Image (tube, coloured by chain):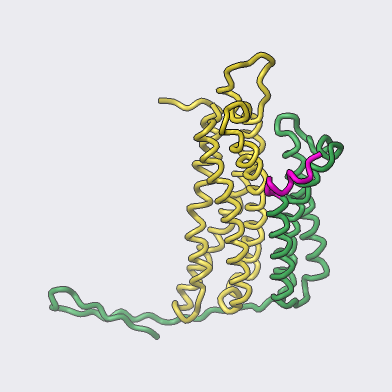
Amino acid sequence: MELSNRETWAALHGMVFGALFLLAFGGGFAGLWSLRPEWITANGLKERMLRLKVGVTSMAVIAWITVITGTWIVYPWYRATPPQGTTDFTEYPRSLLLATPGKEEWHSFGMEWKEHIAWASPILATAVAFIVLYYGTQLITDKKLRFLTMGLFVGAFAAAGIAGLLGAFITKAAPVL
Amino acid sequence: MASVTVRRDDGKSTEDIKWAAGEIEIVERASGPAAAAFIGAGLGVFFLGLFTTLNEASTGLHDWLIFDEGVGPLSGKTTVAVVLWLVSWAVLAVPLWKRNLSYGSIIAATGVLIAAGFIGTFPKFFELFAE
């Protein structure tokens, strides 16, 4: 039981960094949602704020690592052009999908959307991290700013979720080996 | 001050937990930096969608966007979008830093830009412009 170099990077990109971002979203969203003085004490809010700052900043960093590893390390293996005369496309996922009847759309729609929309996630997550770091405790009393930040956070999650889901399906149809 | 009473199942004892509410200091800051961050992020997503679509519409731009042969035009589309996002954010932050903007205008501008960006990255949309 072993993973090739390519499989290791693909797993790090999707199953470690990408999955970590998606899993951490629930915690970050709950943290923003619960910044309510009527629910918890000031001491609780202080502790929660520190956790939120560390959490959203880590998530932004993870989102960047996910798209950078995906685009610059894994994607070139996915889109590599097979040498002339190649009939076995196992090591060329894009060519394999395009050459397999019924699977073309996994590339022409799935990968084409995934590779672009994924980049929206770190941009939005970075803005969220800035807001939380800069405004800090003001998010407790400034309800509109908090809701706006939560909206942007949901946008980052939606972009990552679409990319992650499509990535999982594409990997199932034609894995990077 | 709040208190919680703990009653054990066997009913033999009760304990009172009390804690102080504590104090928290909140520094109110202008909404300008938030506006710059939100609208800047919206512009970043918009540029991502714009270059994804323009890449389909222009062969010349498509070729120029190939910053790396292995990655193809995605290397240029994403690099340019990220650079323009950071520049937009910085440019917006300077005049807005001390200003207070209404959240309504921030939501409207950011929402429209993000929606346009998402549409621009959607294959069924950008394929309409394929040369």
Q: Is the magenta stretch mostly helix, strand or loop?
A: helix
Residue appearing at x 74%, y 55% in the figure: B46
Number of numbered discs present? 0
Residue appearing at x 67%, y 54% in the figure: A123
Can you name the residue that lies furthest to the bottom here? Answer: B1
Q: What is the drawing colour of chain B? A: green
Is A79 positioned to the left or the right of B47 in the image? left
Above or below — where is A139 with respect to A166? below
- The C terminus of chain A, quarter of image: top right
- The N terminus of chain A, quarter of image: top left
Can you name the residue that lies furthest to the right here? Answer: B60
The chain in yellow: A
Q: In which quarter of the image is residue A115?
A: top right
Q: Position of residue A101 (x, y in %)?
A: 57, 29
Per the rendered image, the range of residues in magenta is B121-131
Whether residue A30 is in magenta: the answer is no
Can you name the residue that lies furthest to the front here? Answer: A101
